[in-house]
Amino acid sequence: MTNIISRPHTETEEPHWIEWVTGVVSSVLVIAIVAWVAYEAITEEKTPPDLGISMTKRSPVEGGYRIEFDIANKATTTAAAVTVRGEILEGGAVVEDADVTFDYVPAQSKSSGAILFSQDPGNRQVRIRAVGYTDP
Amino acid sequence: MKGVTAAQPDRNIRDPRPFLIGLGRGAAGAMLFGIPMLMTMELWQLGFYVDRGRLFLLLVVNIPLLVVLAHRIGFEHTSTWAEACRDAVIAYGLGILMSAAVLLMLGDLKTHMPLSEILGKIAMQAVPASIGALLGRSQLTGQADGGKDDDLGGSLHGGDSGGKEGDAVPNTLSTSYSRELFLMGVGALFLSLNVAPTEEIILISFKMTPWHALACIAMSIAIMHGFVYAVAFKGTHEIPEGTPWWHAFFRFTLPGYMVAMAISLYVLWTFGRLDDIAPTQVIMSAIVLSFPGAIGAAAARLIL
């Protein structure tokens, strides 16, 4: 306990057992976090961002068509300013394309977003891919 | 003000001036502590995109926090929980008012904005501002105020003891210990709220390697311990003679760091920084945010 009445504060010499329990639990947690991060530090291999995109939902919106997607980064480094381009292909030729930029796609994490086309792709092929990123 | 002494505790009830001065200090505190956040773009944006459930939870969590804080450093001498509740409500109200006023002045609130955006922006800012209102009450108080400020006064002029525990029940072990942890939590929350919404926190965590993170943990804990026990600031805690240094380290510093980390995680979660993020990245962000959090926690032990 801390004696707040007198100044300077003095920690008592006979702390309550709860204080020791809290201390022990906390030190276990701190050690666990340190061990975890240390394990990461030792074992982690730096792999460049590995971006995979999967379309999740297509829906018409006012004045266009929306395709939602998830972008996952399986690597151990984060990609910043990730530009994702969506294209509608007709017979191999690009009919329409649209870009979207993600501020970050963190390592081993995923983000989601959507591309808005002005037309319904219908049965035509839609291609969504990451076209570039920077290191944070 | 100089005429008010501890010998006239009843004056508080009849004379509105100390209360009004308290209000003024609260408003000043809300400004002083709130201005860095009021002028942060990310917090304005959070006002409209933050998950409403999480914002609601933050607003609700703030209430007991203010009440307990007010019980310690009220606008006036608060000896009962009812008075602490009143002070907490006043502080919250001041926080909301000052946030609204400053945001309005900065041109960040416009009439054409949807109501939910306006409310969200104000609500977001009201939390740190209301804590600031209570802290301002404490920190802008001069020594001359004597008896009215016996919580702070108690620590300023050692003999002015009793304070809000005025009925002279000595602090029980567990309440005092939990209060220390609570104060650390408030300090951590306050500094975390300051920096957590900025993009820099996640950017730093992306730039850091795990080795940097380990150094950050060690540094945070060392600063926390050093702040309170080694370098003598006002209110510095002392370890009694003959007690090994690691007693305080285990009982206060490490739990304090865990409190700071828990608060960091909570704040990051509230701001949606942890959604769909891998556990390793989560812990890295928490370690980064715990650095200011730890400093805030240590400072709170000294100041409050």
Image (cartoon, helix red, strand yellow):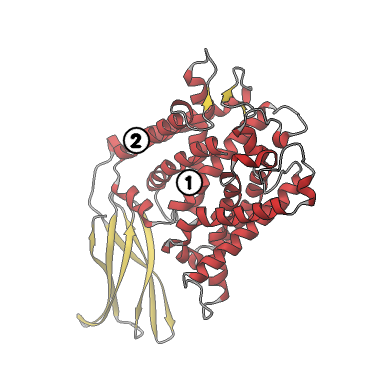
Foreground residue among B134 and A103: B134
Q: Element under label 2?
A: helix
Foreground residue among B96 and B253: B96
Residue A79 horizontal/vertical position (percent)? 28, 57
Q: Which corner quadrant of the image does residue A59 belong to?
A: bottom left
Determine if residue A77 is in view: yes
For disc 1, the chain is: B
Determine if residue A24 is in view: no
* Three-letter residue code for mark 1: Ser
Q: In terms of sequence position, does the residue under pointer 2 or pointer 1 come before the other?
A: 2
Give the class, few, some or many, for how many residues have Cα within 10 Å of label 2's Cα (few <14, many ≥20): many
Q: Dots 2 and 1: beta carbons under 8 Å?
A: no
Question: Residue at position x 41%, y 41% from top?
Answer: B291
Identify residue for label 2: B214
State whether residue A41 is above or below residue A11: below
Quarter holding the C terminus of chain B is: top right
Identify residue for label 1: B264
In the picture, measured across the screen, residue B225 lies left or right of residue B3, that is left
Residue B282 horizontal/vertical position (percent)? 41, 47
Q: Furthest residue to the front?
A: B3
* Three-letter residue code for mark 2: Leu
State whether residue B248 is above or below residue B37: above
Foreground residue among A83 and B62: B62
State whether residue B263 is above or below residue B110: above
How many numbered marks appear? 2
Q: Furthest residue to the top?
A: B242
Give the class, few, some or many, for how many residues have Cα within 10 Å of label 1's Cα (few <14, many ≥20): many
Residue B256 horizontal/vertical position (percent)? 51, 34
Q: Element under label 1?
A: helix
For disc 2, the chain is: B
Question: Residue at position x 71%, y 37% from top?
Answer: B164
Question: Residue at position x 69%, y 50% from top?
Answer: B18
